[in-house]
Image (cartoon, helix red, strand yellow):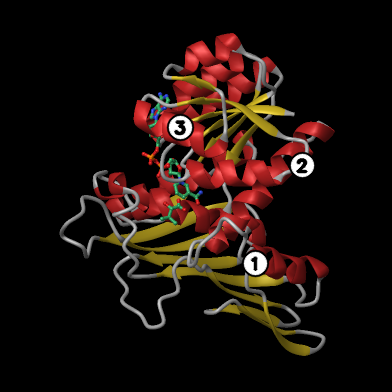
C-alpha cells in the first residue's frame, strides 16, 4: 500500500516513523506549504516526491491513501480534495471546527466510496487497550460508572504554540480524546454537562474542564482534564481511569498501574513499550500512533469500517460542541 502525507509539522514526525515501522506500506509523497519543513522531513524519511500544494500532489496520484496531519481549519478542504482524488483518508483530530464541516467530509468520502478515519489515537494507547480488554471480558460485570482523568502541568505550548492561541483549548484539543475513551468504555452519550476555567493567563482558551456524561445504557461518567495542575510525579500524558461494574472495579493509576478487583484481585504494570524512535514521556502517545495506523491499514485492506471512522467521530465531536454550549449556558445538554 502506498501513502502520501499532508503536513510535516510537530506531530507528523510520529506518523512518519510509525508508517516506516508497518510492513507493506510506503509513504511516496509529502506535502507542506512550509518549504523548510517539507525538505527537512523529506530528507529525514528519504521521500523523493515533494509538493507545496496538496491539489498538485493529489492530481499526480500514485498512492492509495492520504494522511492529513495539519491543524483543524484546513481539514475540510484537504479531505474533500482527497475524496475527489478517490484515495482513502486518515485525518488528524480535531476532525472539524464545526459539525457542518464534519458532516460534509463524511459525505465526501462516502460518495467517493473511500475509507475515512479520524486519527483518534488515545483509545489505542496500550494501557487503555489493556483496561478495555478487562471490561470487554465481563470480569467486572456491567459497568455503571466511569472516570477518565487527565491532569497535568506539562508545557504543551512550546511544541504546539497554536494551542495557546485559540479561543477554545483543552476540550477541543485534549478533552476530545478523553470523551472518545469514555465512549469506548461506556458507549454513546445522551446528555452532557460541563464547566470550564482558564487558569493560565498567557493563553486564550480554557485549560481546565470537568464534564458529566449520561450514557445511553444508563451509565454515568466524569471526564476531567487540566493543564493547570502542578503534580508530582507529573503524569503527562497518562489518561487515568476508574470503571465500576456490577461485579468489580478497575483502576488505571499513575505510572501505568492497572488494578482489577473482579473474579480475582490483581495489579499489573501496563507501561507502553519505548519504540526506538520514541522518547519519554511521549512514548505512550507515540506507541498509539503506530497502533492506530496499523488499524487503519487493516480496515482498508479488509474493507471494514475503522473504530474511529469519520462517521463515528461525529458523535465525539458533537460531545465537544455540547460541552462548550453547556459550559456557556450553565445547563445540561441533550445529544438527541
Ligand atoms: P504543526 O503546526 O506543527 O504542523 C502542521 C503542518 O501542516 C505545518 O508544517 C504547516 O505548514 C502544514 N500545513 C498547514 N496547512 C497546510 C496545507 N493546506 N497544505 C499543506 N501543508 C499545510 O501542527 P501539529 O502540532 O503537527 O498538529 C497537527 C495536527 O495534529 C493537529 O490537528 C493537532 O491537534 C494534531 N495532534 C494530535 C496529537 C495526537 O496525539 N493525536 C498530538 C499532537 C497534535
Ligand atoms: O494529543 C494531542 O492532541 C496533543 C496533546 C497531548 C498535547 O494534547 O495536542
Label number found at residue 155: none
Q: Is residue 3 above or below residue 317?
A: above
Residue sitting at the far left: 201
Q: Secondary structure at mark 1?
A: loop
Is the C-beta separation of discs 1 and 2 under 8 Å? no
User: Looking at the picture, does residue 98 appear above or below residue 284?
Assistant: above
In the picture of the structure, the residue carrying the numbered disc 2 is 23
Disc with the residue nearer the chain's start (1 vs 3) = 3
Ligand 2 quadrant assignment = bottom left
Work out whether residue 120 or residue 136 is closer to the camera in this orientation and state it: 120
- Residue 205 at what x, y percent from top left? 25, 51
Q: Note whether ligand 1 is within 8 Å of mark 3.
A: yes
Residue located beneath label 1 in the image: 273
Q: Quadrant of the N terminus?
A: top right
- State if disc 3 and disc 1 touch (CB < 8 Å): no
Reply above or below: 16 against 215.
above
The quarter of the picture where residue 37 lies is top left
User: Which of 306 and 27 lies nearest the eye of the viewer?
Assistant: 27
Residue at (58% x, 70% y) in the render: 146
Quadrant of residue 90 in the image? top right
Furthest-bottom residue in this view: 265
Tag 3 residue: 7
Amino acid at each position: 500500500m502506498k501513502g502520501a502525507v499532508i503536513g510535516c509539522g510537530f506531530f507528523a514526525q510520529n506518523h512518519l516513523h510509525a508508517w516506516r515501522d508497518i510492513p507493506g506500506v510506503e509513504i511516496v509523497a509529502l506535502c507542506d506549504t512550509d518549504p523548510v519543513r517539507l525538505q527537512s522531513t523529506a530528507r529525514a524519511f528519504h521521500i523523493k516526491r515533494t509538493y507545496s500544494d496538496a491539489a498538485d500532489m493529489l492530481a499526480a496520484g500514485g498512492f492509495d491513501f492520504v494522511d492529513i496531519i495539519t491543524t483543524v481549519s484546513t481539514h475540510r478542504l484537504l479531505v474533500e480534495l482527497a475524496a475527489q482524488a478517490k484515495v482513502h483518508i486518515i485525518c488528524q483530530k480535531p476532525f472539524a471546527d464545526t459539525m457542518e464541516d464534519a458532516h460534509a467530509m463524511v459525505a465526501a468520502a462516502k460518495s467517493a466510496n473511500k475509507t475515512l478515519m479520524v486519527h483518534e489515537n488515545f483509545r489505542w494507547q496500550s494501557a487503555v487497550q489493556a483496561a478495555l480488554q478487562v471490561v470487554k471480558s465481563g470480569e467486572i460485570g456491567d459497568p455503571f460508572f466511569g472516570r477518565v482523568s487527565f491532569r497535568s502541568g506539562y508545557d504543551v505550548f512550546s511544541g504546539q504554540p497554536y494551542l495557546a492561541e485559540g479561543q477554545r483549548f483543552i476540550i477541543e484539543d485534549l478533552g476530545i480524546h478523553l470523551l472518545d475513551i469514555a465512549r469506548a468504555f461506556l458507549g454513546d452519550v445522551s446528555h452532557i454537562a460541563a464547566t470550564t476555567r482558564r487558569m493560565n493567563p498567557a493563553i486564550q482558551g480554557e485549560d481546565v474542564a470537568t464534564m458529566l456524561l449520561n450514557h445511553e445504557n444508563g451509565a454515568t461518567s466524569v471526564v476531567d482534564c487540566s493543564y493547570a495542575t502542578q503534580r508530582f510525579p507529573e503524569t503527562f500524558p497518562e489518561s487515568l481511569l476508574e470503571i465500576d461494574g456490577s461485579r468489580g472495579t478497575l483502576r488505571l493509576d499513575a505510572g501505568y498501574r492497572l488494578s482489577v478487583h473482579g473474579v480475582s484481585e490483581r495489579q499489573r504494570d501496563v507501561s507502553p513499550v519505548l519504540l526506538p524512535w520514541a522518547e519519554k514521556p511521549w512514548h505512550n502517545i507515540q506507541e498509539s500512533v503506530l497502533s492506530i495506523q496499523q488499524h487503519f491499514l487493516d480496515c482498508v485492506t479488509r474493507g471494514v469500517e475503522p473504530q474511529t471512522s469519520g462517521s463515528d467521530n461525529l458523535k465525539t465531536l458533537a460531545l465537544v460542541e455540547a460541552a462548550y454550549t453547556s459550559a456557556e449556558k450553565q445547563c445540561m445538554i441533550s445529544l438527541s
